[in-house]
Image: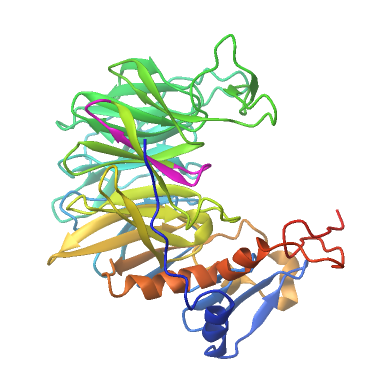
Amino acid sequence: MRTSFRPLQRAGFGLAALAIILSGCQTSQRTSGAAGDVFSQVSTNVYFTPVNQLLTPAGLQIELPGLRPQALALSPDEKIFVTAGKTHELVVLDPRTGKILQQVPLPSDKDTDPAPPDVNAPILQPDKEGQVSYTGLVFSPDGERIYLSNVRGSIKVFGVEANGKVIGLFSISLPPATAPSRKIEIPAGLAVSRDGKRLYVALNLSNKLAELDTNDGRVLRIWDVGVAPFDVALVGNKIYVSNWGGRQPDAQSVTGPAGRGVKVRVDPVRYIANEGSVSVVDLKSEIVTGLHASALAVSPNQRWLAVANAGSDTLSVIDTRADKIVETIWTRQSPADLFGAQPNALAFDQSGKKLFVCNGSQNAVAVVDFNPGKSELCGLIPVGWFPGAIATTHHKQRTTLLVANIKGLGSNKSLNPERNKGSSSLQYRGGISVLVAPGEKELPQLTQIALANMRHGLLQEAKLPARAGQPARPVPERVGEPSVF
C-alpha cells in the first residue's frame, strides 16, 4: 500500500490571498443570526458562510431553493442529468447549460404495478412524503429508466421517453428492515446490471445487499455485507459494497451503537467507529478501508475501484483483479493539517487518468492525477458549500464537472434581519455547479483561492509553537495555548 501526496504550491495564499479577495469586494448587506453568525453575499460570486469560510464557486451556478441535492446521475447519452434532495421530486437538468428542464413528482408507494395501462398518464397521487436517501440515484444502461432510493423504504422508478422527457412510473417496495427499532428499510446506493434486468440495492439498516428483478420488483437474492452499507459498484461478475461502519462485529469485537439498535465495531479506548470496509460479494470477502467508506467509482477500464473514506480524509484504491488495496491517497494538503477534507463523492474522467473528488468540508473538488501506486493530489477547484455528489460529462474533447453542492451558496437569500426568528436550518437552498475541468495552467490559481477560502493560512499558523502569556480563549489561536474550557 502506498500513501501518495504532492505538496501544493503555497506561495500567495493564506491571509494575504484572503485579503486580496476581500479587498476587491463590493459592499453589500449582511444578515446576522441570533447567535451573531453572518450570512452574506460579499460581492459578485463571493459569499461568506456562518463557519467563517468564503465561497467563490467556479463555473455556472444553478440554485435549487428548498432542495439539498444529495445525489446526482448523468444519462448514458449525456443529454440530461438528474438530482434529488430534500424535496419530493426529481429535478432534470441540461448538463451543458444547467437549465432546469423538469421537476418530476415522486411516484406514489401505492403505484406498484410496473406495467400500468398507460405509462404516459400523469401521476394522480404523487408521493408527498418520500425523498432521496443518503444516496441512490442511477440510470439504467440503456438510459430508459431512472431508479431513486426513497428513504421511506422503497425504490422510485422513472421512465425516460425518446424526447428526453422524464415521467414517474411506479415504486418497488422493499422488505422490512431487520434493525431492532425501525422496520422501514433505508435503501442507499444503487447499481444496475449491464442488461438492465437486475437492480442492486444497499440496505443500510439491515446490513445487506439485495438483488431485485427490474421487471416486477421481486427480491431475487440477499447477501450479508458490512455495517451501514452505502454505495454499490459492479465490476464484471463482482459486486462491491462500501460500508460506513466497516465489518460486522464478531464475538471478540468491542461494539457501540450505530443507530436504530444496530451495533458497530468501535475503538476500545475512544469508543468510536474504527474502520470502514468494502464487501466483495461473489468472493464473500471484505477489504478493510479508512473510516466511513462512502462513494465508489470504477475506472473506465474496470481495473480500479476508488473508495472515498470520508472519516479518514483518504481514498483507497482497490485492484479489482486481486481485490487488494494498492494505494491510499490523501485528499487534504498534508496529513498533518488540522482541518479535514471529508471526501464523500468521486468520479473519473473519460480517460481514467483524472479523478475528481468532492471534499465536503473544504467546499472544493480535489483533482487527482490517477496512476495507481503513483497517484498525486494536484489541486483544488472551489465550488459551493459542501459538495456531496459529482459526475463528469465529455463534449468536444472537454471534461465538464457536474457538482451537487448540498448547501449551495448558503441560505442568505432567505434571511431578513427583521425576521430572524422565522428562519431555521431547515430552509434549504442547495445548488449545482457546472464547470469545465481546469487545465494545468488554471489549476494552481484555483487551488490558492480554495485554500484561502477555507482559511488554510490561519490553520498553518495554529501549528506554530504556543506563545507565553496569551489570554484564555474559547478556541486558542495556536495548539497548546490556554482555553476557557
Q: Nearer the viewer, residue 195 or 479?
A: 479
Coloring scheme of the render? rainbow
Picture layout, residue 402 above or below residue 27: above
Evaluate whether residue 214 shows in this view: no
Q: Residue at x 25, y 31 (%)?
A: 234
Quarter of the image where one finds residue 251: top right
Q: Position of residue 250 (x, y in %)?
A: 55, 12
Picture layout, residue 42 above or below residue 245: below
Give the total number of marks visible in the rendering: 0
Q: Residue at x 84, y 59 (%)?
A: 482
Q: Position of residue 382 (x, y in %)?
A: 43, 68
Q: Position of residue 72 (x, y in %)?
A: 35, 51
Picture layout, residue 14 above or below residue 475: below
Residue furthest to the top: 251
Left or right of 458 on screen, residue 167: left
Picture layout, residue 204 above or below residue 20: above
Quarter of the image where one finds residue 209: top left
Query: Which span of residues is magenta-colored?
Result: 309-322
Q: Residue at x 54, y 75 (%)?
A: 47
The quadrant the N terminus occupies is: top left
Is residue 330 covered in magenta?
no
Evaluate whether residue 479 shows in this view: yes
Q: Residue at x 42, y 61 (%)?
A: 7
Q: Nearer the viewer, residue 457 or 232?
A: 457
Q: Nearer the viewer, residue 104 or 73?
A: 73
Q: Nearer the viewer, residue 139 or 13?
A: 13
Q: Position of residue 231 (x, y in %)?
A: 38, 35
Left or right of 177 on screen, residue 326: left
